[in-house]
């Protein structure tokens, strides 16, 4: 089978496909502190990160260190956020899953304790705590995809819902808005099929009528990037009678 030629060009690392990571605000992880007690911090600023859909909150901890967190919904500047097992189960606080009652919405869950948060991080998303199994030390969580996942009960999570949930409410009224939205994250847009392209852009392009591939025969021993059109065909062209 032939390879996807757009993916081949993307893999070369040209500036057209390269992600503008120099404009990103950095990683967003839970701070490395002792979560057996309770530590509080104050939200001092909200920031927009082009690399993610959710807003980022800067939190000043008790030891005067600043950390970046996924901003919860309804949290404001100056509000206090609690970290640890002794924190209350309220919006924006960070607790282990075993201390959160079933039916509570959470986000930015750790898949393994200490990884800083890996799943349920996009704007407006949240997961639900289904149940706790003390014998195995696992917590059943219902993800936004409606699937359930068992996660270590010592993993951290933030209570509430990710901010920026109304991001998709405003429609893209013209193509220029979508163009700049995709360009901000290094996404290829618009995406069309190879048949609609010019011959210089794709192996399937340049046709005067809709057809897939070219009527030339390609060897079965050709490299994957060359295997387009009719591969090891016995014959090509319109079959003539008589």
Image (spheres, helix red, strand yellow):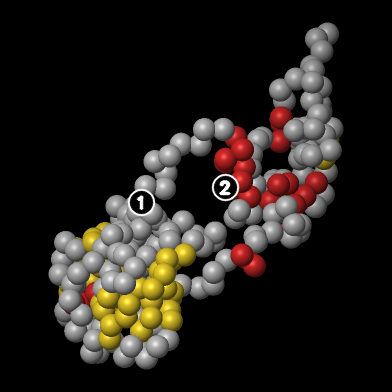
**Residue occupied by mark 2:** 181
**Residue occupied by mark 1:** 165
Q: Quadrant of residue 118?
A: bottom left
Name the one closer to the observer, 62 or 68: 62
Name the one closer to the observer, 19 or 193: 19
- Secondary structure under tag 1 reads loop
Q: Is residue 24 left or right of residue 195?
A: left
Instruction: Name the quadrant of the C terminus.
Output: top right
Q: Residue at x 19, y 63 (%)?
A: 104
Q: Residues within 10 Å of mark 2 (few under 14, many from 20)?
A: some
Q: Residue furthest top?
A: 242
Upstream in sequence: badge 2 or badge 1: 1
Name the one closer to the observer, 88 or 224: 88
Q: Quadrant of residue 227?
A: top right
Q: Is residue 159 left or right of residue 7?
A: left
Question: Measured from the top left, where is residue 91 in percent x and y?
Answer: 23, 66
Q: Is residue 17 left or right of residue 220?
A: left
């Amino acid at each position: 089978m032939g390879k996807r030629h757009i993916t081949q060009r993307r893999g070369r690392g040209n500036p057209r496909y390269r992600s503008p990571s120099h404009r990103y605000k950095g990683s967003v992880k839970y701070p490395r502190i002792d979560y057996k007690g309770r530590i509080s911090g104050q939200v001092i600023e909200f920031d927009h990160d082009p690399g993610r859909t959710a807003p980022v909150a800067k939190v000043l901890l008790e030891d005067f260190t600043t950390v970046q967190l996924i901003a919860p919904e309804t949290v404001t500047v100056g509000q206090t956020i609690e970290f640890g097992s002794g924190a209350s189960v309220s919006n924006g606080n960070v607790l282990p899953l075993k201390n959160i009652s079933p039916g509570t919405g959470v986000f930015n869950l750790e898949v393994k304790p200490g990884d800083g948060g890996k799943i349920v991080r996009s704007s407006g998303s949240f997961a639900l705590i289904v149940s706790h199994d003390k014998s195995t030390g696992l917590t059943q969580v219902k993800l936004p995809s409606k699937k359930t996942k068992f996660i270590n009960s010592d993993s951290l999570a933030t209570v509430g819902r990710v901010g920026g949930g109304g991001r998709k409410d405003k429609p893209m009224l013209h193509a220029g808005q979508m163009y700049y939205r995709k360009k901000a994250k290094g996404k290829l847009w618009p995406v069309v099929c190879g048949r609609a392209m010019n011959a210089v852009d794709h192996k399937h392009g340049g046709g005067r009528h809709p057809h897939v591939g070219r009527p030339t025969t390609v060897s079965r021993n050709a490299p994957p990037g060359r295997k387009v059109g009719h591969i090891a065909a016995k014959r090509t062209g319109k079959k003539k009678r008589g």
